[in-house]
Amino acid sequence: MKTRLISLESTISTNDHLKALAREGAEAGTCVTAKRQECGRGRLGRSFYSPEGGLYISYLLRPRCEPEKIPEITKWAASAVINCLDALGVRADIKYVNDILLNGKKLAGILTEGSSSDGKTDFAVIGIGLNVDQRAFPDELKDIATSLYLETGNTFGIDIVASCLISELEKLADSFPEKEEEYMEIYRRRCIYESYPDRQL
């Protein structure tokens, strides 16, 4: 999958921006990144704190699959994030179903949104917010959220992390849905048991 990258200084939401482009006919592999989001979103309408220092990225798929398969993309995306972090030398965990934890705190969140018509999938957008170089969080978040910098003391750089993650998303796009077991094996192995009751011990 060849990526077409659109880099923004700021946007309301990278997912909303990319969904609008998808409805206008954007090709699979279109990717939107932003330095900050004004109204970042997570699952169930929750807000996602999105200041500068984080990586906010949305990636467009046009998979040939039933609309019912779209929610499974979130698990694939979580596995892709894990692969990216592993490549950077950071071992994180998945909290069922769409959070990435580092040392017990939230490092990243994933939101997959799709569109379908006549029983066919039109597109799916994978949105990922990954805390990279933030040095502090508001009082209401400091005990539950973290960044790569806060946990490792290293400044990874947004561009380096983005390049690594985009590479993994390209692999995901080329693999979905055929290589399901490969991605689900990563998901099962790295998902926290307390939040993933179907995991086999």
Image (cartoon, rainbow, N blue to C red):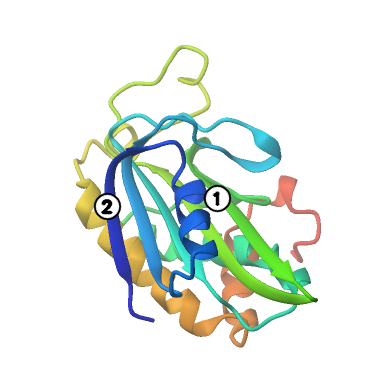
Q: Which residue is mark 1?
A: 110
Mark 2, Cα crowd under 10 Å, few <14 / some 14-19 / many 20+, is few
N-terminal-most mark, 1 or 2? 2
Point out residue 112 in the picture as x, y percentages from the top left corner.
Answer: 60, 56
**Placement of 23 over or under 95, stated as above or below:** below
- Residues at marks 1 and 2 touching, judged by CB atoms closer than 8 Å: no
Q: Identify the disc placed on residue 19.
A: none
Residue 87 left/right relative to 115: left
Residue depth check, mark 1 versus mark 2: number of the one nearer the observer: 2
Identify which residue, 83 or 117, lies in the foreground.
117
Identify which residue, 134 or 129, lies in the foreground.
129
Point out residue 182 in the picture as x, y percentages from the top left corner.
Answer: 58, 80
Q: Quadrant of the C terminus?
A: bottom right
Residue 44 left/right relative to 63: right
Please identify the residue farthest to the top as the structure is shown: 139
Point out residue 83 in the picture as x, y percentages from the top left corner.
Answer: 42, 66
**Placement of 154 over or under 17, stated as above or below:** above
Point out residue 142 in the picture as x, y percentages from the top left corner.
Answer: 45, 20
Question: How many marks can you see?
Answer: 2
Q: Report helix, strand or loop for mark 2.
A: strand
Residue at screen point 53% across, 51% down: 93
Q: Amino acid at mark 1?
A: Ile
Residue at screen point 46% across, 29% down: 49
Residue at screen point 59% across, 40% down: 42
Q: Which residue is mark 2?
A: 7
Q: Quadrant of the N terminus?
A: bottom left
Q: Amino acid at mark 2?
A: Ser
**Placement of 4 over or under 108, stated as above or below:** below
Please identify the residue farthest to the bottom as the structure is shown: 178
